Image (tube, rainbow, N blue to C red):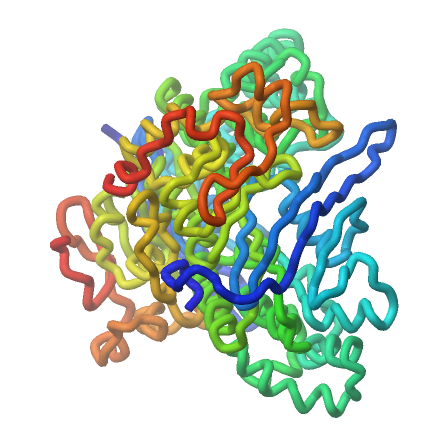
Amino acid sequence: MDPVLAVEDLTVTLTRPDGPVPVLERLSFSVEAGRTVALVGESGCGKSMTALAIMGLLPEGFARTDGRIRLAGEDIAAAQPSRLRALRGSALSMIFQEPMTALNPVYTVGDQIAEALRLHQRLGRRAALERALAMLRAVQIPAAERRLHAYPHELSGGMRQRVMIAMALACRPKLLIADEPTTALDVTVQAQVFDLLKALQDEMGTAIVLITHDLGAVADIADTVAVLYAGRCIEQGDTRSVMRAPQHPYTRGLMGCTPHLRLGAAADAGTGPLREIPGLVPPLGRRPAICAFADRCGRADATCLDNPQPPLAEAGPARAVACWHPEARAA
Amino acid sequence: MTSNAASAPTGADLLQVNDLKVHFPVPGGGRVHAVDGVSFVVRRGASFGIVGESGSGKSTTAQGIMRLVPATAGQVVLRGADILGLRGARLRQARRHIQMVFQDPFASLDPRRCAGDLVAEPLRLLEGLSRRQAAARLDALFAAVGLPSEARSLFPHQFSGGQRQRLCIARALATEPDIIVCDEAVSALDVAIQAQILNLLAKLQAERGLAYIFISHDLGVVQHLCDEVAVMYLGRIVEQAPTRTFFSAPRHPYSWSLISAAVPAGPARDALKARYLVRGEPPSPIDPPAGCRFAGRCPFAVERCRAEDPALLATGPGHYVACHRVGEIEAPDFDRAQAA
């Protein structure tokens, strides 16, 4: 099956007075209809910039300097602004971390959901509001008729995120980009929002790009995962396989530094200090020519310090890793 | 040692919170019962975790203890004195012994002042040290939190998020407090940085015998750091237990729901979620209804739960549960969830 989204060698550069600075470097990943790919990594790894590049919403000074972004075969990176406007909200949609800042406070939620339908599907006001109501029901908002006329501030955080999802999916997009969609929500509400996203995805066949720093969320919802570090993909593959046996020391480090819940009899076992990844992600403009993770890596040796960036190389069935010394495959 | 592998906390009582209430009037009538009768004891050198969702009152409890919001009723006893009743010099004296670290280190540091001044401020205000005397203590404080001493002349925006939180911790440590209240102190940090800060908090506790009140929505973090756990729901503690007891055999249906939501994905989790994860969101804390506050979402509620407010009663050593049906309902099989 052709992927809904295929990002190929995407390169984004920031222009500064003292010269160009690489932001994303030859990033490639794809996702098929009804499937979810997760982009994970720390702040500054390029996750959100990737989302903005796909949406054609790169901030001032940032530009795509190489690579293609194909949405159902069409290279949208090369598309005219008018074409992108037609695609955004219809074929291509996004939900953000903080629904309060992404919703317009002076319009009712019904009008906001209806806006995309009126614009892209040329529905009249009444028909658009009817569809908006159906969407509010689809995202399981109780008393949907009443909530249609509510303003964002009248809703709880979980409800607002459901409204965002209703807006994003109203035109049944082929691709949904979800940027930390549950980070601002309580854990029990998070679980409900993920269940909802999965159910709607099954029904509509939407492809999802999930951007998150939460490995629990990845295990929960993603079919494949791409781990980003300093603007590059350093490991990718099937979620279960990557999480069971991470090959890149950074992926392994990310998994080791999260405290894992120990329940039942296992709660009696003690733990020592958490594994740390020392140091910080190198800031923009200060990425080394060698492996960007080398200065934080316990496995780094002369090979890592004397060679250029390791390429993203095949590492088993549907797995790839960019490391001179990947961890053993068996696990 | 700070993980719950350490023996049960045996330190003497350090801080006692007795029947703390924080109510706010609502414009147009009614009262928000943000904290509605919370009592607990923090032992010297131990970590007391408070978990719960937004609106549970966990942060307001911290703010009430710190007197950042006025308490409606109750006592907070530290070193023999009720700090809710102190004023002036005696309050400043008490504040040396209890300090706080907030979620967002950027919002809690004055952007116009350099790191050295920020860390020296509590020494000057609360201990009355001169600028020179305070400066003499800075090197040790910066070293304790893993910041280079050259960082003293930098401004908050020149630090990364993790370094800013280290700066907030240095500021909290300056007056050598007995206890630090950490309100979602690692929640805004990336996982790799979160691990660094958690390890730092554990190290400082081991070195200095510090106690923590550690407020978090993240059960994994609380299990890692805390000796005791209290679960709050709509202004009340609904379950409290030593950490090991809590995660091996929790007894309140709301605790089951929180844990079910945090179990790693898999078939065992799906089974737990189907039976124990509650739907919807907490009701409004404005004039909460009679009866158990959780009854409206509880899958196991019966008539009595809607009529009668359950008391927090001991069900085992150090284990308290506020539920009429404790022991009547089949508990989740968390051993199976763990094995998966």
Q: Is residue A158 left or right of residue B202?
A: right
Most foreground residue, B281 or A96? B281
Q: Quadrant of residue B115?
A: bottom right
Query: Where residue B52 appears, x then y in whole percent?
Result: 56, 42
Q: Quadrant of residue A252?
A: bottom left
As drawn, B274 above or below A222: above
Q: Residue at x 24, y 72 (%)?
A: A299
Q: Quadrant of residue B4?
A: bottom left
As drawn, B61 above or below A93: below
Q: Residue at x 53, y 73 (%)?
A: B209
Q: Is residue A210 left or right of residue B88?
A: left
Most foreground residue, B149 or A169? B149
Most foreground residue, B157 or B253? B253
As drawn, A238 above or below B11: above
Q: Is residue B183 left or right of residue A258?
A: right
- How many marks the image carries: the answer is 0
Query: Where residue A311 appears, x then y in whole percent?
Result: 24, 61
Q: Residue at x 39, y 22 (%)?
A: A199
Q: Is residue A202 left or right of residue A82?
A: left
Query: Where residue B285 appears, x then y in whole percent?
Result: 70, 32
Work out whether residue B307 can be spotted. Answer: yes
Work out whether residue A73 can be spotted. Answer: no
Quadrant that contains the N terminus of chain A:
top left
Q: Residue at x 53, y 53 (%)?
A: B49
Query: Where residue A295 appears, x then y in whole percent?
Result: 35, 75
